[in-house]
Image (cartoon, grey):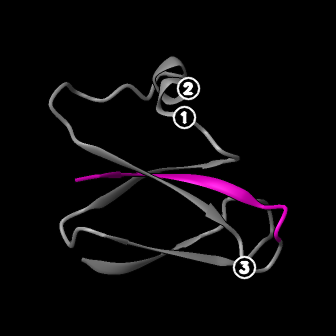
């Protein structure tokens, strides 16, 4: 596992969230709010079958109101 830093997706916010993931993991989406995978599929971000995803729900350290979801392809 490696520690990954990802920038908050809210406009003009420079906060960086952190989470642990597989070293081969690749961030494929950052969305504002707590987003379930079903919503990603509905908005056209459905992935090829067989892809393993990990959802991370983060809170910005700069502004606690900024909550966001990161999808990681493993």
- Quarter of the N terminus within the rendering: bottom left
Which residue is located at x 30 percent, y 29 percent?
A: 47
Provide the residue span drawn in magenta. 64-74
Between 64 and 11, the one lying in front of the other is 64
Examine the image and state in which quarter residue 7 appears: bottom right
Pick the front one: 48 or 67: 67
User: Which residue is pictured at 30% across the width and 59% down the height?
Assistant: 26
Left or right of 14: which side holds 63?
right
Tell me if mark 1 has few (under 14), some (14-19) or many (20+) residues whose alpha carbon lies within 10 angstroms of its own: few
Q: Which residue is mark 3?
A: 61
Q: Secondary structure at mark 2?
A: helix
Task: Point out residue 72 in the picture as x, y percentages from the top left corner.
Answer: 36, 53
Question: On the picture, is 72 further left or further right than 43?
Answer: left
Q: Is residue 54 left or right of residue 68?
A: left
Q: In this figure, which residue is indicated by the disc labeled 1?
A: 36
Q: First in sequence: mark 3 or mark 1?
A: 1
Question: Picture coordinates of residue 35 (x, y %)?
Answer: 60, 39
The question of residue 70 being in magenta is answered with yes
- Residue matched to label 2: 39
Report if the CB atoms under discs 1 and 2 are less than 8 Å apart.
yes
Q: Residues within 10 Å of mark 2 (few under 14, many from 20)?
A: few
Image position of 48 with respect to 1: above or below: above
């Amino acid at each position: 596992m490696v520690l990954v830093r990802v920038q908050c997706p809210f406009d003009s916010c420079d906060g960086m969230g952190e989470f642990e993931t597989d070293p081969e993991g690749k961030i494929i989406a950052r969305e504002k709010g707590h987003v379930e995978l079903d919503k990603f599929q509905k908005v056209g971000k459905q992935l090829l079958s067989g892809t393993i995803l990990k959802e991370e729900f983060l809170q910005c350290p700069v502004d606690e109101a900024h909550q966001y979801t990161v999808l990681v392809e493993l």
